Image (cartoon, rainbow, N blue to C red):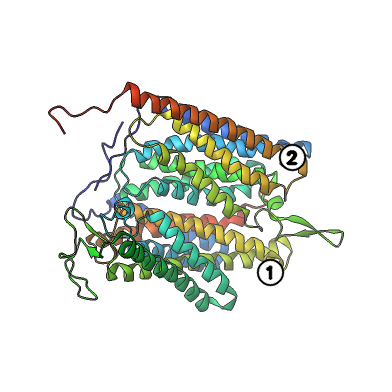
């Protein structure tokens, strides 16, 4: 048994099938209706927030320059690891930042999440280039475009023969920071929405104050946010099939598919997370 | 760039492993319910064994899924498995004695939807995608629920969110010192996610043998059980936690020695009996 099927390696973007689109739209509508039915308007708004958060995560992953194994050998541009690892790093850093800032209010918490994710990617991208340039002795050159869209630096003179480029050009660095910020923002949004739902429901359910219930609400919201973050990140990774250089890469144009996928997946996972406490005590 | 991942043929059929893994893990997870029947905590370690049984099944599923070049690396499959599994496991935990069954149903729903989205929206077009992601989500849910039952001695949500702490000689109920309130679930998430993906990630390539891969999966499962057994000293009585630790250590040692034995067998077979064949007419 070997790799016989696999994703179609065509140059153009295959649009989603009609069935896929219809199923996604139905799932989102059903989830929204269930949220309204279970937790009324607050639940509906929370699920909308979760879907927006999931979409931000799925969209943000497309900005991050993921190089994979070829990048580790200096044969392709990007950070030398997989999407799941990078997204987990940026997302968790963003989530820590956002959760720390949660008591300071909604806008500050979102900003904290975005800065946390963006900062982690900025440090990662900088250190990746330090290792590439001073450790491996290779210049940064993209293989997909001839000119850096921001700085105007040209690449073909610096690109080694037989490689797809190497190092981390400035546009990829910017893409990484933007992607980390969007991912951190999305993850924090999911966390805050779930935290609000649990903090509203739990005190009445367990007969305790909001302060007493805080460890459970924070822990559950955090774990669910991580779970949904990774689901969306992996679906986005499947969308770009492995490696991407950043926003200038032709693969970036595939992002509408990931947005639909992330919205439907977040809606389904989100309705289970919002309705978590509804089954309690039924059996 | 399609990466060809070679998988050894033969071995036990996947459906047989699926049935053994599913039925075995459900029986093992229900054996932890003896804790509540007999009002002790000695049966907590069965939760960890359920996790090991599920992980062996999950490693075989990942082997099937990743033999189609996903392009994103094997770890992403483990991340999406646990991302959807952790939500299902916690939703299931709220239903008392039906927890494992409800968790499996919820996980199957989330996994099937993720598979549909991956095939029809993101357009992976992999024939086994829907089945594999469904199986992986179920494996993730059982692993999380099993390890939760092992660390807390129960899979009942109300018992998992309340812990006791001794303040100045008085025993006080507190939410912060519980399995969920203490965020042990986040740790379980990562321990299971690493265990599920490592086996195939480490063994893939030419001469991959099913028995060796699955033995490594069991070894990773027992390795994840060890820290959980250590943590369980904080939540269940001393003797049951000690039993859990001994079971994990003995299981890990046995599977590790077996794995090394199988690795030596395969290395020998590869080096001496099957020389690397040069293509005819020179490379």
Query: Picture coordinates of residue B148 (x, y %)?
Result: 63, 46
Which circle, 1 or 2, is nearer the viewer?
2
Residue at point 37% right, 66% down? A125
For this view, does A100 lie left or right of residue B261?
A: right
**Given the image, what chain letter belongs to the residue carrying mark 1?**
A
Residue at the limit of the structure toward the left, as seen here: B281
Please tell me whether mark 2 sits on a helix, a strand or a loop: helix
Q: Secondary structure at mark 1?
A: helix
Is A82 or A62 nearer to us in this picture? A82
Residue located farthest toward the right when viewing the structure as drawn? B169
Q: In the image, residue B93 lies at what x, y percent?
A: 62, 48
Quarter occupied by residue A163:
bottom left
Q: CA distance from mark 1 to mark 2?
A: 34 Å
Horizontal side, residue B68 vs residue B246: left or right: left
Vertical relation: B237 (above or below) A100: above
The residue singled out by tag 2 in the image is B240
Q: Is residue B143 above or below residue A161?
A: above
Camera sees residue B211: no
Residue at the image position 48 percent from the left and 60 percent from the top: A33
Seen from the viewer's position, the closer of residues B272 and B39 is B272
The image quadrant of residue B23 is: top right
Residue B2: tell me if it is visible.
yes
Q: Residue A66: percent from the left, percent from the top?
A: 33, 58
Residue that label 1 marks: A210
Could you say which quadrant of the image residue B8 lies in? Answer: top left
| Label annotation for residue A159 | none
Q: Position of residue B248 (x, y in %)?
A: 63, 37
Q: Residues within 10 Å of mark 1 (few under 14, many from 20)?
A: some
Few, some or many residues within 10 Å of mark 2 (<14, 14–19, 20+): many
Relative placement, left or right, of B198 versus A173 is: right
């Amino acid at each position: 048994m070997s790799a016989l099927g696999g994703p179609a390696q065509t140059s153009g973007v295959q649009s989603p099938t009609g069935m896929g689109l219809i199923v996604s739209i139905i799932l989102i509508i059903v989830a929204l209706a269930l949220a309204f039915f279970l937790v009324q308007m607050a639940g509906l708004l929370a699920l909308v927030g979760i879907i927006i958060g999931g979409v931000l995560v799925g969209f943000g992953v497309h900005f991050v320059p993921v190089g994979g194994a070829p990048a580790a050998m200096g044969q392709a541009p990007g950070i030398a690891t997989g999407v799941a690892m990078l997204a987990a790093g940026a997302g968790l850093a963003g989530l820590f930042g956002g959760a720390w800032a949660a008591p300071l209010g909604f806008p500050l918490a979102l900003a904290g999440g975005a800065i946390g994710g963006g900062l982690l990617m900025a440090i990662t991208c900088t250190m990746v280039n330090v290792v590439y340039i001073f450790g491996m002795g290779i210049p940064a050159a993209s293989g997909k475009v001839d000119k850096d869209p921001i700085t105007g630096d040209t690449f073909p003179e610096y690109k080694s023969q037989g490689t797809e480029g190497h190092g981390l050009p400035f546009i990829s660095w910017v893409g990484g920071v933007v992607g980390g910020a969007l991912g951190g923002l999305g993850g924090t949004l999911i966390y805050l929405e779930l935290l609000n739902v649990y903090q509203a429901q739990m005190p009445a359910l367990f007969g305790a104050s909001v302060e007493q219930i805080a460890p459970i609400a924070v822990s559950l919201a955090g774990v669910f946010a991580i779970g949904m973050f990774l689901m969306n990140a992996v679906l986005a990774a499947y969308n770009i099939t492995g490696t991407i250089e950043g926003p200038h890469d032709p693969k970036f144009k595939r992002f509408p598919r990931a947005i639909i996928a992330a919205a439907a997946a977040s809606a389904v996972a989100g309705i289970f997370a919002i309705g978590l406490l509804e089954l309690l005590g039924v059996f | 760039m399609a990466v060809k991942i070679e998988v050894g043929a033969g071995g036990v059929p996947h459906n047989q492993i699926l049935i053994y893994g599913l039925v075995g893990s459900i029986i093992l997870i229900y054996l932890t319910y003896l804790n509540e029947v007999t009002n002790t905590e000695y049966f907590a370690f069965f939760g960890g064994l359920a996790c090991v049984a599920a992980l062996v099944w999950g490693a075989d599923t990942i082997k099937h899924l990743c033999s189609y070049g996903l392009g994103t690396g094997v770890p992403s499959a483990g991340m999406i498995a646990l991302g959807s599994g952790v939500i299902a496991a916690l939703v299931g935990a709220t239903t008392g004695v039906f927890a494992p069954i409800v968790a499996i149903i919820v996980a199957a729903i989330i996994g099937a939807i993720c598979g549909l989205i991956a095939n029809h929206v993101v357009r992976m077009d992999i024939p086994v995608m829907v089945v594999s992601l469904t199986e992986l989500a179920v494996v993730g849910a059982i692993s999380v629920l099993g390890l939760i039952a092992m660390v807390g001695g129960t899979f009942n949500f109300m018992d998992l969110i309340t812990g006791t702490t001794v303040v100045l000689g008085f025993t006080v109920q507190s939410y912060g010192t519980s399995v969920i309130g203490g965020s042990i679930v986040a740790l379980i998430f990562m321990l299971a996610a690493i265990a599920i993906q490592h086996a195939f990630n480490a063994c893939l390539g030419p001469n991959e043998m099913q028995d060796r891969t699955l033995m490594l999966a069991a070894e990773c499962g027992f390795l994840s059980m060890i820290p959980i057994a250590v943590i369980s000293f904080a939540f269940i009585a001393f003797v049951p936690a000690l039993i859990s630790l001994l079971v994990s250590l003995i299981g890990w040692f046995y599977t590790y020695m077996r794995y090394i034995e199988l690795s030596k067998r395969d290395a020998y077979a590869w080096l001496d009996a099957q020389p690397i064949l040069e293509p005819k007419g020179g490379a």
